[in-house]
Amino acid sequence: SNQWNYEREWRMLKRLDELEKKPLENSFIYLDSIPTEAIEGVIFGLGVDEQSKNKIKQLIKDSNPSAHIKAFNLKQIRETYGFELEEV
C-alpha cells in the first residue's frame, strides 16, 4: 500500500510447504533462512517480554556477521498516541 511507503519495510510470502516446520509449545512455527546482510534491524513490539528480547539480542551479539544489526524497542507516546523507536 502506498500509505505505508515511509516504513521502507519488506515482507516475504512463501508457501508453508517451502518452509521448515518446527514445534512451538502447542503449535508449530514455519521458518525460512535469509541472508544476515539483508537484516538492518529488529524492532521489539510493545508486548515482547524481556526474556525474549534478551535471547534475540544475544543471538545478534553472538553472530559475527550480524554486527550491523540494530535492536530497537517500540515505545508508545501517550500524548499523541504515536510511536517512537528507542535503540537498545
Image (spheres, grey):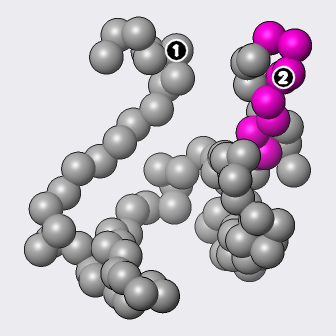
Q: Earlier in the sequence, mark 2 or mark 1?
A: 1
**Residue 75 part of the magenta-drawn span:** yes
Which of 8/48 is in front? Answer: 48
Which of 35/1 is in front? Answer: 1
Confirm whether residue 68 shows in the render: no
Whether residue 30 is situated above or below residue 38 in the rendered picture: below
Q: Where residue 6 is drawn, which disc sits there?
A: 1
Q: Residues within 10 Å of mark 1 (few under 14, many from 20)?
A: few
Give the residue pinned by disc 2: 77
Residue 75, horizontal then vertical, whole percent: 81, 35
Instruction: Judge left or right: residue 28 versus residue 57.
Output: left
Instruction: Judge left or right: residue 48 versus residue 25.
Output: right
- Determine whether label 2 and label 1 are within 8 Å by CB: no
Whether residue 75 is situated above or below residue 61 in the rendered picture: above
Residue 74, horizontal then vertical, whole percent: 75, 39
**Residue 22 part of the magenta-drawn span:** no
Give the magenta-colored segment's residue range: 72-80
